[in-house]
């Protein structure tokens, strides 16, 4: 019984071991499929994102992460 309570307390305090939390979301550099123009899009965007030059949709919202239609060329840091 002592081992079970020790394991339970360890699981409850597991998040305390993370010193600096990191977000799961990022700003992504996306190249449009049509014109290859680079756009910066939030990975968890809640609205449709269109290309700046040609107007095609490059990211669509879903329940959490956006569906990326173009090619991801990296992150914008």
Image (cartoon, helix red, strand yellow):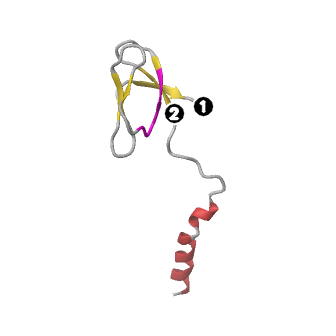
Residue 37 vs 21, above or below: the answer is above
Q: Which residue appears at 65% of the width and 52% of the height?
A: 20
Query: Label 2 crowding class (10 Å Cα cut-off): few <14, some 14-19, many 20+?
Result: some
Q: Is residue 41 magenta?
A: yes
Residue 62 vs 74, above or below: the answer is below
**Cα distance between the residues tagged 2 and 1:** 8 Å
Q: Looking at the rendering, which quadrant does residue 76 occupy?
A: top right
Residue hosting label 1: 77
Residue 57 vs 26, above or below: the answer is above
Q: Quadrant of the C terminus?
A: top right
Q: Looking at the rendering, which quadrant does residue 66 occupy?
A: top left
**Residue 68, percent from left and from top:** 37, 31
Q: Looking at the rendering, which quadrant does residue 35 occupy?
A: top left
Q: Which residue appears at 51% of the width and 37% of the height?
A: 26
**Residue 49, percent from left and from top:** 38, 28
Element on which disc 2 rests: strand
Q: Which mark is residue 27?
A: 2
Q: Which residue appears at 33% of the width and 20% of the height?
A: 56
Question: Disc 2, disc 1: CB below 8 Å?
Answer: yes
Whether residue 62 sits left or right of residue 7 in the image: it is left
**Residue 21, percent from left and from top:** 60, 52
Q: Which residues are magenta?
A: 39-45
Mark 2 or mark 1: which comes first in sequence? 2
């Amino acid at each position: 019984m002592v081992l079970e309570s020790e394991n339970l307390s360890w699981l409850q305090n597991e998040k305390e071991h993370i010193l600096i939390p990191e977000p799961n979301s990022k700003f992504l550099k996306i190249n449009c499929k049509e014109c290859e123009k680079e756009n910066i899009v939030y990975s968890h965007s809640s609205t449709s994102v269109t290309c700046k030059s040609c107007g095609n949709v490059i990211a669509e919202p879903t329940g959490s992460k956006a569906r990326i239609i173009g090619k991801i060329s990296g992150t914008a840091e």
